[in-house]
């Protein structure tokens, strides 16, 4: 089953969400169709034209947004004077509710990738009455063990890259929370320090991909690279702003709150997050969820078999 053709948005705008932030949004597909909102990854990435291709444009009213500080939203995280203290999970959840009401939507399907799956899960746990279904891929829950795995645990599999990653930090900062340590460098008043730290961070992210690319073109843009590394380390270094108890996994703990919300988890068998069994634990703790495992694929929603499974999931929920 191929993905759907690329389509153009029929409406877009900037939503004032407070704290000096304006969030970019756009809508495409059928204005009378079933509402669905797409949550991009990162944190720190942005929406793109590929996401709507996973939905039948005749059946869905597809809402995309760039989260605070990302993409076309303002002020950008790439601006050093942007206040990151008002960019937290709670703020993003509130933004989603503002956008839902702004667009006159009662309930919507929530689709999320990677960090977007964390945000989607927490949003659904906070506002189950607003969510018809969840479709999640590159599934994560934002727990402290997941951050520890991605910043330190994978070092045993990628020792040369990990040595370089640690070398980017002062010696006294190499034993604790590595994301928080990098975030301190990325928030340095010295522009050269910030730039080196952002490069070191994205080099590590490239290295730990289960099917590593030679390079990631978007990381070659210094503006994007800084904004992305700043936002990721801001969240990863602060327990994803999920509150007390995230050392054991707040989202997993609250999985029973999703009872009554159907969901499909599409996961690559080679996704590094699988080393902690997160997606299986979530599936078994969430009544009404289904797990679709795609062989020989890593953390890559764009792989053909992954995209096909995501289309099948949205098609299944189109009439619900």
Image (tube, rainbow, N blue to C red):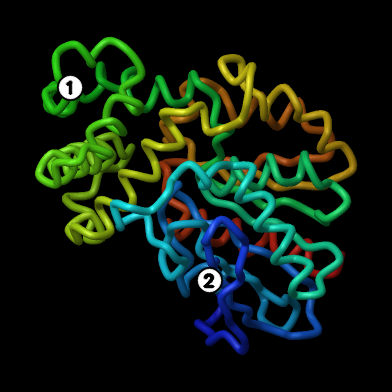
Q: Secondary structure at mark 2?
A: strand
Residue 83 point in image, percent of width and height: 42, 49
Residue 133 point in image, percent of width and height: 78, 53
Total count of labels? 2
The numbered mark, 2 or 1, whose residue comes first in the sequence reads 2
Q: From the viewer's perspective, is 214 left or right of 132?
A: left
On the image, which quarter does residue 253 sit in?
top right
Name the residue at 81% across, 84% down.
32
Q: From the viewer's perspective, is 30 left or right of 89?
A: right
Name the residue at 66% across, 62% down.
312
Name the residue at 56% across, 66% down.
65
Q: In the depicted view, which residue is nearer to us: 79 or 105? A: 79
**In the image, residue 36 above or below residue 279:** below
Contact (Cβ within 8 Å) of mark 2 with mark 1: no
**In the image, residue 171 above or below residue 146:** above
Residue 134 point in image, percent of width and height: 72, 51
On the image, which quarter does residue 159 sit in?
top left
Name the residue at 42% across, 35% down.
270
Instruction: Identify the residue under disc 1.
Output: 166
**In the image, residue 63 above or below residue 217:** below
**In the image, residue 32 above or below residue 259:** below
**How dense is the environment of label 2, judged by Cα within 10 Å: few (below 14), some, or many (20 and up)?**
many
Report the Cα–Cα distance between label 2 and label 1: 36 Å
Residue 210 point in image, percent of width and height: 33, 37
Q: In the depicted view, which residue is nearer to us: 277 or 201? A: 201
Instruction: Identify the residue under disc 2.
Output: 24
Q: Secondary structure at mark 1?
A: helix
Disc number for residue 100: none
Q: From the viewer's perspective, is 96 left or right of 175?
A: right
For the C terminus, which image quadrant? bottom right
């Amino acid at each position: 089953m191929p993905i759907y053709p690329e389509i153009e948005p029929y409406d877009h705008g900037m939503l004032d969400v407070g704290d000096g932030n304006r969030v970019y949004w756009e809508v495409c597909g059928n204005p009378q169709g079933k509402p669905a909102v797409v949550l991009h990854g990162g944190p720190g990435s942005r929406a793109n034209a590929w996401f709507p291709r996973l939905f039948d444009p005749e059946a869905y009213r597809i809402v995309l947004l760039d989260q605070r500080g990302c993409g076309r939203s303002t002020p950008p995280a790439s601006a050093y004077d942007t206040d990151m203290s008002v960019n937290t999970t709670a703020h993003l959840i509130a933004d989603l509710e503002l956008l839902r009401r702004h667009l006159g939507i009662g309930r919507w399907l929530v689709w999320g990738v990677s960090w977007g799956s964390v945000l989607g899960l927490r949003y659904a746990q906070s506002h189950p009455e607003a969510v018809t279904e969840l479709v999640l891929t590159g599934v994560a829950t934002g727990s402290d063990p997941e951050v520890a795995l991605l910043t330190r645990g994978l070092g045993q599999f990628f020792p040369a890259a990990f040595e370089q990653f640690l070398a980017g930090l002062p010696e006294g900062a190499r034993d604790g929370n590595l994301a928080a340590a990098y975030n301190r460098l990325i928030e340095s008043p010295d522009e050269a320090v910030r730039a080196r730290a952002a490069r070191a961070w994205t080099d590590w992210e490239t290295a730990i991909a289960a099917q590593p690319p030679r390079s990631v073109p978007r990381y070659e843009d210094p503006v994007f690279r800084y904004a992305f590394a700043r936002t990721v380390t801001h969240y990863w270094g602060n327990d994803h702003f999920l509150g007390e108890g995230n050392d054991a996994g707040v989202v997993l703990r609250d999985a029973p709150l999703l009872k009554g919300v159907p969901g499909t988890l599409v996961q690559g068998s080679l996704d590094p997050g699988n080393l902690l069994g997160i997606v299986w634990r979530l599936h078994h703790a969430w009544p009404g969820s289904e797990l679709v495992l795609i062989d020989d694929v890593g953390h890559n929603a764009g792989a053909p078999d992954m995209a096909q499974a995501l289309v099948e999931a949205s098609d299944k929920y189109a009439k619900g």
